Amino acid sequence: MSDLTMYLTNGVVMGIIYALSALGVSLVVGIMNVINFAHGEIYVLAGYFSALFSVSLGIPPLVAIPLAVAGVFLFALVVEWAFIRHTYGNEMKSLIITFILSIVLQNAYLLVFGPFPKKPPNWVHGAAHVFGMFFYSNQRLVSMLTAVGIIAGFFLLLHKTWFGRVMRAVSMDREVSAMMGINPTRVNQVSFGVGCALAALAGVILTPIFPVTPTVSVGVSLTAFVVVVLGGMGSFVGCVAGGLILGIVENLGAAYIASDYKHVFGFVILITVLLVRPVGLFGQKRL
Amino acid sequence: MSHLEVKNLSKRFGGVQALSEVNFTIEEGEILGLIGPNGAGKTTLFNMVAGTLPVDRGEVLFMGEPITGLLPHQVCRRGIARTFQITRIFAEMSVLENLLVAQIGNRQKRPQADPEEFALELIELTGLGGKEFMQAGQLNLIDKKRVELARALATAPRLILLDEVLGGLNTSEIPEGVELIRTIRDRFHITVFWIEHIMGAIMRLSERVLVLDQGRLISEGPPEKVSRDPQVVEAYLGEQNA
Amino acid sequence: MYIQKGNRKWLGWDQKRWLWALLGVLAYGLLPLILDRYWLHVSIMILFYIMMASSWNLLAGYTGQISLAHAAFAGIGAYTSGILAVKFAVHPLIGLALGVLLAALLGLGLGLLCIRMGGIYLTLTTLAFSEIIRLVINNEYEITRGTMGLKVPVLFGTYSKVTSFYVMMAAALLVVFAIRKILYSDLGMSFRAVQNDEAAAASVGLSVFRIRIAAFVITAAMAGMAGSLCGHYLLLITPHIPSLDMMFLVLAMAVIGGLGTFTGPILGAIFLETLAEQIRVWGEFHVLLYGLIALAVVRFAPLGVVGSLNERFSTGEGPRVVKESAS
C-alpha cells in the first residue's frame, strides 16, 4: 500500500512538472499555431544556465535562477525573430525549422557544455516522511510546490491581466484580433518568449533533480507534446490534467508493468488520443 | 427517371438546423438554379449531395441509385462534379495538369478519349487557351475560376454543381460566363445545378429555380413565378432589414 | 501521354538530359576502380542516403506528409533480416525480402493511424511510432543486442567492398528509377494533387485515403530495403539506424537539396555525406554543421538548392513543394 502511495506521489509530482513544461508548448501552439520542436532544448538551456551561473560563477541560486530564465527568454526572442517569424502560416515549414533547430541546439550543447551531466546545487536537502509511509526527496517536493506556484501565477496572468486577455483573444481568433488593432507580430514575439520562459522555468526547477545533458532534451519535448495532445492543444486545464495523467500512468506503468518501457506509455497514450479524440480531453481546436 | 432526387434531407450543426426536410428532383438536361439569402444552407446542400458532409437524415439518389453517404471521390466517379465557392485549384500544378489529374479517377467514363486532347479542348472552351503550362496558382481570380470549372468538366460528369461560379466577375464578363454554362448543358448534355447570387444571371438562364431560406425549401418553379412569390420576397427583404 | 509533341521527352526529360543522367551513373559506377577503401565506403554510404533521402522526399515532398518515422522503417528492415539471419539462419536475401515486407506492412499501419491527421499531429504520431520502435530495439537486448550492435552476415557470397558497392548501386538505381516512374505516372500526379488540396482532389474522383496510404507503404518499403542492405554491408546493425539522428540526416539532405524536387535529395545526399567525411577529420561536428546549413537553407532558400535553381531558371524540372501561404 505504501508502495502504491509512493508511486502515486511521484506520479503527481512529476505530473505537475510535466504540466508546467507543457504549458509553454500549449501557449505557443494556441497563439501561433507553431509546434516548437526545440522545446526540450530550451528547457535544457535553462538548466545549463542555472548550473553555469550557480556552480561555475558562484552566483547564489536565488539570483541564478531568474537570471537563467531571463537569459533563455532573450534567446527565445532572438530565435523568434531569426527563424520562427518567417514561417507563420506555413505549418510544414515551422515544423521543419524547429526540428532542425532542435538538432542544432543539441549538438551545440555537446560542443559548448560537453557530454557530462550538469546540475545546479539542490535548493533543499534531505527527505520528508510523507503520509508517515515513505521517505520522499525534499527537493522534489519543493520543486513541485514551485511549479504549482508558477502554474497558478500563469493562470492569474491569463485571466486577470490585460496581457493575458490579449493572448487569449489571439488564440481564439487571430484575424478578428488583428482587426481590433492587436499587433499579431508583437503578440507572437512575446508569446514565444513567454512559452520558452515557461519551458525555462520547468528547466530550472527540475535540473536540481534531473541533471541535464545534450540528449535529455528529446525526452522533454516528447513528454510535453504528449501532455499537450492529451490535454488538448491550447487548453490550460488540459495541460494540468494531461500532465497529471501522464505522470501517474508512467509511474504506475513503470512500477507494475515494465520500467524499461516507461516512455512507451506516453507514446501509446499519444497515439490513442489522436485516434480516439484528436482534440484531446479539453481541446477545442480542430485538426 | 429523374437525374437527381433529394428526399427529406436534413442536417444539424450543434444547435443550428442547417437544412430541414429538403425535397426536390432535378430532371436530366435541366438547368436548375438555387438561390436564397446568405446562410440559407445552399452550400451545405451541395456538400451533402457531393458527399463532403455526412447526411443526418434523408437520402440522395442519382440516376435512381442511392448515393447518400458515399465519399466525395465516389460521388464524382458516379458522375457528379462540383466547383467550390472559393476556388480550390491545384496551385502548384499547371493548368493542363489540373485537367489531367481530374481524369485519372474517371477514365471509365470516356475510355476512348485521349486525356491531353480532352484537356486541351476544355482549355479552349473555357477561354484558357495559351495558358495550359502556367502554374494554376499564379493565375488571376477569373482564370482560376475557369480552371476550376474546366477541371470539373474534365471528370466527364453527367451532373455538375456550380457554387457561385460567376462570383467576382465584373458586369462585362457575366454574359460570357452565362453563355459558358449554357454551352455546358447544350454541348455536353450535362445537367446543371447552380447556386448564384447574381439574380439577373440565374433568373435568365435557369429553367427552374429552387429557393432556400434558413434550411427550408420555400419556393420552387420557373424564375418568373418564383420571383413573384411573396415568401421569397419576404425572405430577401428580411435579410435586407437584418 | 507524357511524351510532349515536338520536344520528345520520356518521364519528363529529353534525350539530352537522359544522356547526362546515364553518364553520371556510369561515372559513379567506375568509382570502385579509382577510390581507396575509405572513400569507397563513403560512396557506398552515399548510395544508402540517396535511397533514404529520395524515398522520404517522395512522402514528405510530394504528399505533404512529414514523417519522422523513415529511419525507423530502415531499422525495421535491417533488424528483421539481421535477426532472421543470426537467430534463425535465414538467408539474408530472403531476410531482405521479409524485411521489406514487414516495413511495408508497418508503413501501412502507420499510414492508417495517421490518415485522419494532418500537419503537426501526423508528424507527432510518426515521431511517437519511431520512438517506440527505437525503445523496443534498445530494450530487447536479448534479441537485438541493443547498443552493442547485432553482427550479421554478408548479403550473399563472400564479402567484398566492390560487390557491396554494386549491389547498393543497383538498389539505389532501382529506387530512384521507381520514384521517377511514379512521379510521372497517374499516381505521382495524384500525390501532388492530394498535397495541394485534399478536398479538391476528392472532388475530382481521387481516393485521398488510398493515395496517402500508398505513399506510406511504398516509401516505407524503400527505406526498409535500404536499411537492410546497409546492415548487411556494414556487417553490424545498431540502433543508430532507426534513430532520430539518422532521421535528421535524411531530412537535412532532402531539404537542403530541395524538398519536392527529384534531383534535390540525390544531390543533397552526395554533397552532405561527402562534407561529413571531410569534417570528421576535425571531430564529430558534421551534424551541427548540417544543421546550421539546413537552418540557413530553410530560412533563406526554402526551396532548397535544386528548388531555388528551378525557380530561377524555370525549366519546369519537376513539381515543387507547396509555397508558403500569403500571411
Image: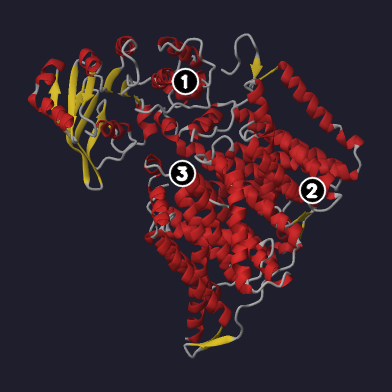
On the same chain, marks 3 and 2? The answer is no
Tell me the distance, in whole angstroms, between the alpha carbons under discs 3 and 2.
Answer: 53 Å
Identify which amino acid the numbered label 2 is placed on: Tyr
Q: Quadrant of residue C59?
A: top right
Label 3 crowd bin: few (<14), some (14–19), many (20+), radius 10 Å = some
Tell me the distance, in whole angstroms, between the alpha carbons under discs 3 and 1.
Answer: 39 Å
Q: Which is more toward the observer, B172 or A278?
A: B172
Question: What residue does disc 2 label?
Answer: C233
Q: Which is more toward the observer, A270 or B6?
A: A270
Q: Which is more toward the observer, A54 or C146?
A: A54
Left or right of residue C241, residue C37 in this image: right
Chain letter of mark 2 equals C
Dot in front, 1 or 2: 1
Percent position of residue A102, x then y: 64, 52
Percent position of residue B16, x then y: 22, 44
Question: What residue does disc 3 label?
Answer: A184
Identify which amino acid the numbered label 3 is placed on: Pro
Question: What residue does disc 1 label?
Answer: B99
